[in-house]
Image (cartoon, rainbow, N blue to C red):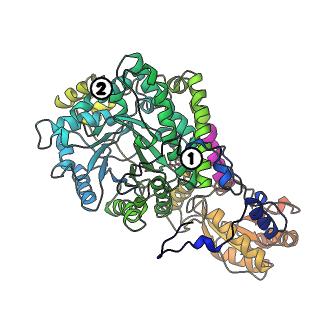
Amino acid sequence: MPGTEAFPPLFDEFDAVTPAKWREHVESDLGGTAPEAFLEWSSVEGVSLPAYLSPGALQNVSHTDPESTLPLADAADTPAGAWSVCQSIRHPDPEVAGKHARAAVDGGADALEIAPSSALSDESGVALRSKADLAQILDGMDPTNASVHLHGGPAAPALYALLRDYLSGGPLEPEAISGAVLYDPVAALASGTAPDRAFSLADDLVADAAEMPQFRTVTVDTSVYHDAGASAVRELACALGALAERLARRTEQARSLPPLLNNLQVRVPVSTSYFVEMAKLRALRLLVPQVIDAFAPAASTPLDVAPADVCVHAVTSRRTETIYDPHVNMLRATTEAMAAVLGGADALTIRPYDKAVRPPDEFGLRIARNTQLILRHEAHFDHVADPAAGSYYIETLTDQLAQRAWTQFQDLEAEGGIVDCLRDGRLHKQISATRDERRRALNERDQVLVGATHYPALNERRRDDLVVPNPPPTNGESPAPLNASSVDALRTALRDGHSLQEVTSALPSASSGVSPLPRIRLADEIEAIRLRTERYAESQDGPPRFLLAPLGPPAIRSARANFCRNFLGVAGFAIEEPLKFDSVGAVADAAAQQGADAVVLCSSDDEYIDLAPALAAALSDRGPDALLGIGGAPGDIDVDDADFFVHQGSPLDNTLTALQDDLGIPTDETS
């Protein structure tokens, strides 16, 4: 390895080690066991990599051949890995949203993502009723300092129409505004927009791009599939399917493809599976040009799109957010942001850590923004183009994701395309299977969400903090039927005095024929259990009290007490955990004194045979009407001695819900 006088060739000091020799040493250290027995990994993506990889792993990875494949990133970029720091603006009050926008730009954001409140969304957004409300956000801003991205899913065309109306005759010229409208007609189908209307609006946005040359008007958005629980492979396949649908329709209409491709961007949520998500973005860059190449013969002009030309706007995952212990969302978002940047995102939006709890405040926005600034200015993530290039692990993972996604995309096309698969529910079933597997893994604790399904903050309460987003109010009158078939029609409706909410409400159609894909957070079903306990606690003297009873050998009693505390704390029960008890009598006395609703015996399996019946008798003698639980599986224990068991095989939902039922906790507000 060549070196310099300042940096000598350090590797010359070491002998080369062949993969076979390395494996021999590893197996020796493992006592003769193969490394695959210790390092086994699989995921819902269906991708499984070996325990270790060597240079030979890249021999069959075609995209790593510099002579036949263009690089995934443009190494001429300066800085090499630059990305736009995008700040989401969603506060319901336009005046407050404007303050947030100006603070974001002053604080280092390169871009703003404005999302309106809408009946088509279950998240908070800015209550924009007219261009005067939009002016409170944009007035006084220099458009050359920050691009503007219009979010809102199916409502994005109406927001774009409002922006165009705001710009007409205003202080800012349309040519000076950079950014994008984040509208994907295929994704809009999942919220009820009729296909003809969705694609008509999308075509209008492409045509309107000539008026705003720095504004991207074509988006492929995988959020709708990601939020429904899809795997990374399925997300990629759906992205390709949506792009193919756009290209096919435009080709059938004999329209030129370059105006669409020149304004294309892909919006991709990034989850916490660090290397998978990094590879997902890299695989996307490989696959998009392949789809475009398939339409080249029918194009009137050459289509030359390289992997580095694909514009990728990443956003941290809503799916992994929790309402309990929301500060942990900062850590999840940091992991997701690192994966997005190292995967080559051109723009990145980090959702505020408390977005699932309430509309974002200044602190949440500042943390989201500063996370990116730290990655840029302190971690120097922007100094290398495609830093994952050459990694045996990530290159192999990128290749496998790309191969599997291409196969699923081909299956999608063979079944009639993504619109047909949405219409007849086939795509829903495929995503549902993955969603169920994700929730099973959480429910059975194969995977955890810290603070929600494991290591709960026992004294945390959230019901008073939760803010359910409401759509902006109207004037109380039912709006007349609106023509929502084109961007010009939307602009006309806004000029005639219709609010953005009324215009957006006119977009869905009963004739869409597509059932909406659900938007979920993985923790929401488990969190509903804890919210049920909280609601009950408000009408009682606090939540049910669980007394842990560590008895017997110190190591096992401590381990099982810790396990039971974390397991039962997920439901929001009040947990009392003494260091130890000396006898079952002492446990029964403490239960009576504290008014415990349940006592959980924590000891070894051998001890349970005697301790369980003795404790049941002692509790009966003292009189507390408490449930008796065992920290462990039934095994040789007489199940009649215990009311419930808590162990590694206990599913969270069934176990905790059954306990709530036994304790008489109502299932809803009216019970």
> SS for tag 2?
helix
Start and end of the magenta stretch? Answer: 432-444
Residue type at tag 2: Asp
Furthest residue toward bottom: 582
Question: Which quadrant: the N terminus?
Answer: bottom right
For the residue carrying disc 2, how many other residues have a C-alpha within 10 Å: few (<14), some (14-19), or many (20+)?
some
Viewer can see residue 510: no
Q: Position of residue 588 (x, y in %)?
A: 74, 75
Disc ID at residue 430: none
Viewer can see residue 587: yes
For the residue carrying disc 1, how many other residues have a C-alpha within 10 Å: few (<14), some (14-19), or many (20+)?
some
Whether 243 is among the magenta residues is: no
Alpha-carbon span between mark 2 and mark 1: 39 Å
> SS for tag 1?
helix
SS assignment for the magenta stretch, majority: helix
Q: Which is nearer the eye, 499 or 646?
A: 499
- Can you identify the residue that label 1 sits on? 64
Hey, which quadrant is residue 102 in on the image? Answer: bottom left
Q: Which is nearer the eye, 69 or 623?
A: 69
Q: Where is residue 389 in the image (x, y as percent from the top left)?
A: 53, 53
Q: Which residue is drawn at 46% across and 76% down?
A: 6
Label 2 or label 1, whichever comes before in sequence order: 1
Residue type at tag 1: Thr
- Asked if residue 132 lies left or right of residue 188, the reply is left
Disc ID at residue 204: 2
Hey, which quadrant is residue 646 in on the image? Answer: bottom right
Disc number lying in front (2 or 1): 1
